[in-house]
Each structure stands twice: as C-alpha cells, then as structure tokens.
Image: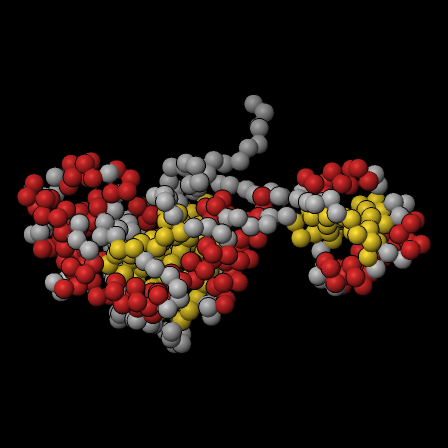
Amino acid sequence: MKFEPERVKGFPEFLPPESEKREAVKKIVEKTFRLYGFLPVETPTIEYDELMRTDSLEEEDEAISDRFRLKDRAGRNLGLRYEFTFQLSRIFKQNPNLKLPFRKYQIGKVFRDEPTSSGRYKEFTQCDIDIIGDASEKADSECLAVFLDILKDLKIQGEAEVNNKKLLNAIIESCQIQNKKAIMKELDKMDKIGEDELKINLKKYADTYQIMTLFKLLAKDLEFFIKNLFEGAEEIKKLEDSLKLYGYKIKFNPFLARGLSYYTGNIFEVKLAGAKKSIAGGGRYDNTVGKYLYKEIPAVGISFGLERLTELANVDSSSNQTVLISIERDKETIKLAQKLRKAGIPCLTMLGKISKALDYANSQKIKNVILIGNEEIQKKKFKLKDMSSGEEKLLTEAQLIRKLK
C-alpha cells in the first residue's frame, strides 16, 4: 500500500504568511520579558519520568497524567516536558548557588497527550516567566503586569481574575467539608458547566447543607473575607494594591482554582474580556522549587500559549522583507540588494516578470517592493512601491535605506 504523507493530528505547523504573524507576536512577548529584567533559560525537551510525575498517582494533575512517556535504548523511563515549572526543582538541585531572586523567561515547545480540539494541540509553544526567591506580592503583581503589557501591545482586551489557594482552603474548611482537593477541582469548572451542574457534582463530596453554606460564602466579596480574617484574603488585597501601581485592576473570583495542585498562594488567570476563554494562567508555588533541597523557596510565575495569543493578536503581520524587482538590470539589482543587507534590511531579488514578482509579494504580505529598470538607473533613483496602499515614491539610495530602516 502506497504511503500518503500527512501531518500527525495535534502537531501544528506554520508556513508564511501565518508564520510571520507568529514571529511578530513572539518578538513583542520576548521584548516585554526583557524590559522587565527577565533573562532567557533553555531546558531539555526530555526529562526522567520520575522528575515529571507526582509522588502519589491518586493526586496526579491532568497535565501530568497527559504527559508523553518513552524509553531510550538503555531502557530508562523518560518523557517529553509538559510544561517548564517542574524542571525548576532539578535546576536548583543541580545549581544550588543560583543568585536569588532568579528571574527567568522561557519560550519553547511542550507536549501533552490529550484530545485535540480547536486551538488545543498535543504540541504547542509555551511562553513562561518566573520569579524565584521573592515572597512578596510585588513579584505576583509584576508577573501579571508583564502579561497585561503584552496584551496592550497586541491590542487584546483581557481581564485578570485572582483567587488564593489558602483562602479557598479556609472557605471549604469553614463548611466542614473533608475532601478539599476534589471540591477545588469541581469549583474550577464553574465557567464551563454552570452553577446547577456544579452543585450536582458537589453532592459526591458534601451534603446539601454544606453545599448551600459553601455557595453563600462564595458569593461574598473580598472585603468580607478580609474582615473575618480568612487566611489568604489579605494576600489578594496586597496583590490588588501592588498591581494598581502598574495601572491595572484585578477581579476577585473565589471559584478560581487553576487545576495544578502545586499552587500555594495567589493564583491568577487572564481571560479574554467579555468571554470565558482563558489566555494565561499562573500563581505562587512556594513548595516546588526547593523540593530536592528539602527547603521552601518562594516562587511565582505565569505562562501562556503562543498559538492562542497569535490567534487573538492584532498586529501588522506583513513581512519585513523587501522585494527588489529587476527590469533587465540584474547587476544593479543585486548590487543594491547587498547594500540593503549590509544596512540590516532583509530583502530578496526577483529577476524576471514584474507581474509574477508583484503577485509573489502580495501572496507573502510583503509591503515594500523596489523596481529597478533603465529609467531608475539613469535618474539614480529607485521606485519604492507600498503594496498595501499602492503609493509609489522615487528615492535615492540613501533615502531608500533610511526609509526601509
């Protein structure tokens, strides 16, 4: 039977011009990370499976249980990373003298063997920032501010929702419900399934009176929990006050639990304004990084997928390349192209039919085209055509370089 090559489902690929938009978004993300003083880190795609999994299979989070497992020739149990956070415990074990606070960013591929759907892949690019060694709410607010700045640059309207793991624990405990982890997982589904179905699901872990009491409490505002000294409420307030210094607001959402069980304090999620679609999530995980050093190292981070962000972004995705079209003046065209490249201007030459070259520029969303023919050579000026507006200008070589830079 003849093999018909096709892409494996759940493993996306990106070709021009879509890849150009993706690269434009990635540059804005990385620029913002660096503006806030985060430095790049690269980690292995493959780790020991023992590092990835939790100590108890009963408590394994969905992202962990969906990891890709594999063996090498030596029979070692390995796997593909499903995120970056768990790798920090190994990094700090092997590099115990890393200077704190350690501010890192990472952009790279992660893998999850889960069902695919629209915008949900088995392989995706995760963008992540973490502040290790700072226990203050300032670190929490800075992680949120970074992402909200990115959204502003990409012209995406987002809303930051915040809760606290300690507060959620205290609320459930006050209702005398035993299985806190199961209750948290159910509460986190509120946006997806609605209140009625959520109450039905909670009956597996609590009686009717406990559920009624729980929902009455969850309807209270943050001030109620602060006045009644619920643990964790004050941490949200401090985060709210700190984030105001950056010009941003948060919305208190007592149902927010963020699936991963390693969160210890403030947890946050950024959603598309007016929608339930989550575009970023994170929080404080003070018990993870120092796991193999047998000590607590404060840590907080936020992560998001590049694919979803690119889909929502409003950026100029036209190529930054310039096409030089030779009208029977190949020598001069190549000479000009080399000068542009030396000036740091990406360009390509097309030595043939004008219509074919213009059609190519349009298909690749290339904005600038330079025409080089006998007339241009005689005048010592080159015709620059803006493909988006149709505007044409005659410019000298020096003017051309200034304009394109």
Image spot of residue 386 (x, y percent):
73, 48
Classify residue 249 by image quadrant.
bottom left
Q: On screen, 180 above or below 396?
A: above
Q: Is residue 312 left or right of residue 198?
A: right
**In front of the other: 92 or 77:** 92
Q: How is the image coloured?
A: secondary structure
**What residue is at 89 percent from the left and 48 percent from the top?**
373
Quadrant in the picture for the C terminus: bottom right
Classify residue 234 by image quadrant.
bottom left
**What residue is at 57 percent from the left and 32 percent from the top?**
5
Q: On screen, 95 above or below 258?
A: below
| Residue 391 visible to an observer of this rendering | yes
Image spot of residue 392 (x, y percent):
78, 48
| Residue 44 visible to an observer of this rendering | no
**What residue is at 53 percent from the left and 48 percent from the top?**
314
**In front of the other: 140 or 316:** 316
Image spot of residue 342 (x, y percent):
76, 63
Q: Is residue 56 left or right of residue 117?
A: left
User: How many numbered badges does the structure rendering display?
Assistant: 0
Q: Is residue 166 left or right of residue 242?
A: left
User: Which residue is farthest top?
Assistant: 1
Q: On screen, 121 above or below 341?
A: above
Image spot of residue 87 (x, y percent):
38, 60
Quadrant in the picture for the N terminus: top right
Classify residue 189 by image quadrant.
top left
**In front of the other: 110 or 57:** 110
**What residue is at 40 percent from the left and 56 percent from the top?**
303
Q: On screen, 145 above or below 317?
A: below
